[in-house]
Image (cartoon, rainbow, N blue to C red):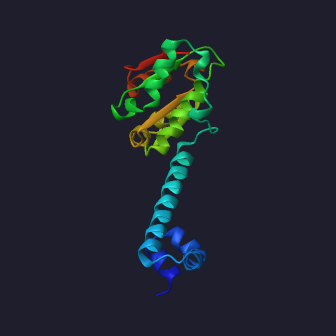
Amino acid sequence: MMIEEAARELKLSYTREYHDSFIKEVNQRGLNFEEALTELLTEEVSHRRNRSYQRRITQAKFQQKKYLADFDDTVFPETSRKQLRVLTSLEFIKRKENAILIGNPGTSKTHFSIAIGIEACLQGFNVQFVNAPNLIIQLKEAVTQSQFVRFKRRFESVDLVIIDELGYLSFDESGQNSYSIYYPTVMTKVQL
């Protein structure tokens, strides 16, 4: 069996794609078998993790990519900065708690929530990002089409749901009822 075939069967995508150049590099550097195998497996693990991160980020459906490193919290009062730092630990996800960011338009709520979501993806959590008006439309459609259980399962299968633009919503009665049935009201509030 050839290396490429074996790597394909074992789902070792890095090895399958780069084995030729890797063998040349090993020969040039004069690595022994153990060193070469260690390096190959390290690269395979790294490649697999990166693909996993990218898959989670893609599945989350972020409207753009934002990162915590690019978030400037110095414009906020110290109390808000402390609360934001607590959220960046992602402990609220592990404890299955909710958080809500409250503030005027343009206060970086979306930037921070996406950055938290991407960080959660990088830490191995599954995330779903959704725009609130679209969520309500989907929720109402699921209820009217008797698909609520499937809809609910979709969100229960992720560790973190980020609902953006919640403040821009005006709920009609059925949207408000559907929303209040599904989403709990206990949450951490952060004023931005």
Residue 143, image x, y percentages: 45, 34
Left of 124 or right of it: where is 27? Answer: right
Residue 188, image x, y percentages: 41, 19
Count of numbered marks? 0
Residue 179 in view (yes/no): no
Which quadrant holds residue 105? top right
**Residue sitting farthest toward the left:** 95
- 179 or 55, nearer to the observer: 55
- 72 or 130, nearer to the observer: 72
Which quadrant holds residue 159? top left
Residue 187 in view (yes/no): yes
Quadrant in which the C terminus appears: top right
**Residue sitting farthest toward the front:** 30
Residue 63, image x, y percentages: 63, 38
Left of 104 or right of it: where is 117? Answer: left
- At a point 51% along the width and 48% down the height, the residue shown is 56
**Picture layout, residue 119 above or below residue 40:** above
- At a point 45% along the width and 78% down the height, the residue shown is 32
- 80 or 41, nearer to the observer: 41
- At a point 50% along the width and 32% down the height, the residue shown is 162
**Residue sitting farthest toward the bottom:** 1
Left of 112 or right of it: where is 93? Answer: left
Residue 29, image x, y percentages: 56, 75
